[in-house]
Amino acid sequence: MEKSLYHEITPEGFGIAIEKDENLYHKTSPYQVVDVFHSRAFGNILTLDGLMMVTEKDEFFYHEMIAHIPLITHKNPKTVLVIGGGDGGTVREILKHESVERVDLVEIDELVIEASKKYFPKVALELDNPKVRVLVEDAIDFIKDKKNVYDVILIDSTDPIGPGVGLFNENFYNNVKKALKKGGIVVPQTEGPFAQSENMKKTYQLLRKVFKIVAPYTGPMPTYPGGYWSWGFCSEDIEVPTIKTIDIKRARKIEKTCKLYNLELHEAVFKVPNFVKELTNA
């Protein structure tokens, strides 16, 4: 009997394939098609418009990287904004930090939240935490009038297609910068250096127009095409972290809760390959 396959092929002509066991969820929102299916290899898997977003087995690679690098680097993060990230994984990691008093999650698509709560309970488990305010709205409008509100802003967006297009432009990044407090840090996901190199290059060109300090950091992401992902460390006044500049005690405490993140990795992820330096003008 022939197996049913999920497959995602990049514009470059290569991608990934995963055996499907069972389709669990299929709904169409005003923004995209939201699907969840189960696989023997990765457990439950969330896709948006057929593109890989979250798997139960490897989600920690992404969520630990986008959250802990900026939050450990910041001296005392209290207010955090997550743009996108309706699956809840980034919020879960943020709330491991005791200093955090409030997290605003701005997700445009309510179906992503609905599907995640039902089929990814270990990922979405903190979305009902009293410290978390879930706002189902367009982040582009939400951020326009915010001034000096957040210590850390994480842009946990989809690729620059569909509802994610407006999160990859200079005006949006300028509004994000205004919403930061002094000493604040912004980290957007910045695509795959191998499979999405042109998108990544354009993103860093935009980021460098807006922020004084911009540095790529990278890590593995098994189920994203290319298996290799990147995030951008952005700030007006906080330098790229090293072991000498971060709170070692706090990092050691967080690493005990993680599968990927640790103190040594914190500095190492900024040591990017030459082709990534070239793409990002690092």
Image (tube, rainbow, N blue to C red):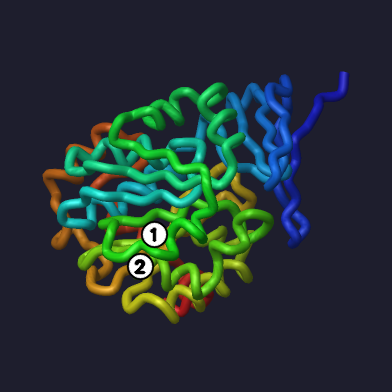
Who is closer to the viewer here, 256 or 185? 185
The amino acid type of the residue labelled 2 equals: Cys
Label 2, secondary structure: give it: strand
Q: Earlier in the sequence, mark 2 or mark 1?
A: 1
Q: Report the residue at 69% width, 25% height from top.
A: 25
Farthest-out residue, right: 1
Q: Quadrant of the C terminus?
A: bottom left
Who is closer to the viewer here, 267 or 155? 155
Label 1, secondary structure: give it: strand
Label 2: which residue? 234
Farthest-out residue, front: 145
Q: Is residue 208 above or below residue 105?
A: below
Label 2 Cα neighbours within 10 Å, binned few <14 / some 14-19 / many ≥20: many
Q: How many marks?
A: 2
Q: Is residue 33 above or below residue 267?
A: above
Q: Position of residue 80 (x, y in %)?
A: 31, 50
Q: Position of residue 16 (x, y in %)?
A: 70, 44
The amino acid type of the residue labelled 1 equals: Val
Q: Is residue 200 above or below residue 226?
A: below
Classify residue 122 as left or right of residue 197. Answer: left
Quadrant of the rendered image containing residue 37: top right
Mark 2 and 1 residues: CB-CB less than 8 Å, in contact? yes
Q: CA distance from mark 2 to mark 1?
A: 6 Å
Q: Quadrant of the N terminus?
A: top right
Q: Position of residue 147 (x, y in %)?
A: 31, 65
Q: Report the residue at 78% width, 57% height from top.
A: 13
Q: Report the residue at 29% width, 57% height from top.
A: 150
Label 1: which residue? 187
Residue 7: mark: none
